[in-house]
Amino acid sequence: MTAILYPVAANAEQALSAPLARAAREREAQALAGEPVAFVVEPAGPPFATREAALDAYAGRLEDERPGRTASLPPEDRYLRLSETVAASRTRAPAQAEPSYEDGRRWPTAKAAPPTVWRLMVSYWRIGAAPAVRTETPQARQARRKGRQDLDPETVRALTQQPLRAVKPQQPLDIGLFEARLPESPHIIVPDE
């Protein structure tokens, strides 16, 4: 199977327009760049109101399944994708809905969803001092339990972008799925049918 060849570049815009090289693995990217690299996924280009507008703007660079415009890329060129995100706005988040108990319904009708935009997401090897995963930030579940205070949007965004970590290390399995311990001899494991 052919691996995706990700661009090696200093930023997302350079990865789109003129990457230094392309590599599938971190070791190859480090050899090409001559310094440490980190794999990142970042938005690039302007936001688009609809998915169709974004597909038209990046025609030939993205998979397109629309009738009459079908485009298929070779596996090594699939480092771009479209992502739908909430449009940046200056308005506050809506208040929590209160139950209404009207007309036989407990909850009021849902308000309209917030406006969204489509962005091009570029996966690439970033050259140089890429931001490392910060382990000192608390997990989202811990931040919610501890503070119970309002979190600013930047903190919430940082919490959603960090990788999930286990609460405690996973213990190795001592028996298989279709095995059982004998009740009279718990040190003996037999197949369970």
Image (cartoon, rainbow, N blue to C red):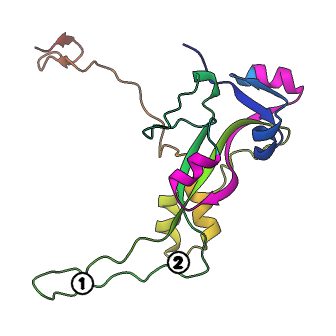
Label 1: how many Cα within 10 Å (few below 14, some 14–19, many 20+):
few
121 left or right, relative to 104:
right
Residue located at (53% from left, 77% from top): 149
The answer to which of 148 and 46 lies nearer the viewer is 46
Where's residue 113, x and y in %?
Answer: 41, 70
44 left or right, relative to 89:
right
For the residue marked with disc 2, what is the amino acid? Gln
Discs 1, 2 touching: Cβ within 8 Å = no
Query: Considering the image in quadrants, where does the C terminus appear?
Result: top left
The answer to which of 83 and 150 lies nearer the viewer is 83
Q: Secondary structure at mark 2?
A: loop
173 left or right, relative to 154:
left
Q: Which residues are drawn in magenta? A: 28-57
Where's residue 151, x and y in %?
Answer: 57, 73
| Residue at mark 1 | 99
Please say whether residue 61 is one of the residues in the magenta stretch.
no
For the residue marked with disc 1, what is the amino acid? Pro
Query: Considering the image in quadrants, where does the N terminus appear?
Result: top right
| Residue at mark 2 | 149
Residue 29: mark in rendering? none
Q: Secondary structure at mark 1?
A: loop
Which quarter of the figure has residue 185? top left
State the separation of the CA atoms marked 1 and 2.
23 Å
Label 2: how many Cα within 10 Å (few below 14, some 14–19, many 20+):
few
Q: Of the residues under marks 1 and 2, which one precedes in the sequence?
A: 1
Q: Is residue 77 above or below residue 158?
A: above
